[in-house]
């Protein structure tokens, strides 16, 4: 993943930690928002759910993905250059 892509996620992580508020609108993302953050399709998000690679939060009948989960997923799937 490029540095510029990581930079946006790092800014989101910093903002979430700095604000530390449950009122932060980026705390929980819709499936479409999570897909946009990872730059993948919505169906890929559901495949990641089914594979147990991405966790979600159930809110009533909807699934949401936390910003922290997006950061965890990226961190765990980042590979070093060879």
Image: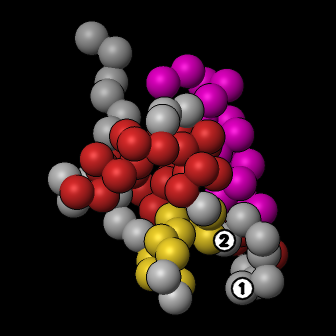
Q: Secondary structure at mark 2?
A: loop
Q: Are marks 1 and 2 in contact (CB under 8 Å)?
A: yes
Q: Is residue 22 above or below residue 3?
A: below
Residue shown at 73% from the left, 49% from the top: 11
Q: Is residue 39 above or below residue 67?
A: above
Q: Is residue 37 magenta?
A: no
Query: Tag on residue 80?
Result: none
Which segment is the magenta one?
Answer: 1-15
Q: Is residue 43 above or below residue 58?
A: above
Judging by the rendered image, the residue that carries numbered circle 1 is 22
Q: Residues within 10 Å of mark 2 (few under 14, many from 20)?
A: some
Q: For residue 23, what is the image quadrant?
A: bottom right
Q: 19 and 66: which one is in front?
A: 66
Which tag, 1 or 2, sits closer to the chain's start? 1
Horizontally, is 38 left or right of 10 in the view? left
Q: Position of residue 77 (x, y in %)?
A: 32, 39
Please give the count of numbered marks on the rendered protein: 2
In the displayed image of the protein, which residue is found farthest to the front?
Answer: 61
Q: Is residue 5 magenta?
A: yes
Q: Residues within 10 Å of mark 1 (few under 14, many from 20)?
A: few
Judging by the rendered image, the residue that carries numbered circle 2 is 27
Residue shown at 46% from the left, 62% from the top: 69
Horizontally, is 42 left or right of 46 in the view? right
Q: Main SS type for the magenta part?
A: helix
Residue shown at 66% from the left, 71% from the top: 27
In the displayed image of the protein, which residue is found farthest to the top?
Answer: 82
Q: Is residue 19 above or below residue 10?
A: below
């Amino acid at each position: 993943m490029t540095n510029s892509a990581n930079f946006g996620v790092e800014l989101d992580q910093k903002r979430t930690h700095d604000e530390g508020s449950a009122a932060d609108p980026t705390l929980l993302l819709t499936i479409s928002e999570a897909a946009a953050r990872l730059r993948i399709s919505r169906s890929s998000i559901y495949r990641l759910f089914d594979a147990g690679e991405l966790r979600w939060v159930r809110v009533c009948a909807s699934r949401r993905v936390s910003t922290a989960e997006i950061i965890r997923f990226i961190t765990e799937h980042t590979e070093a250059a060879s």
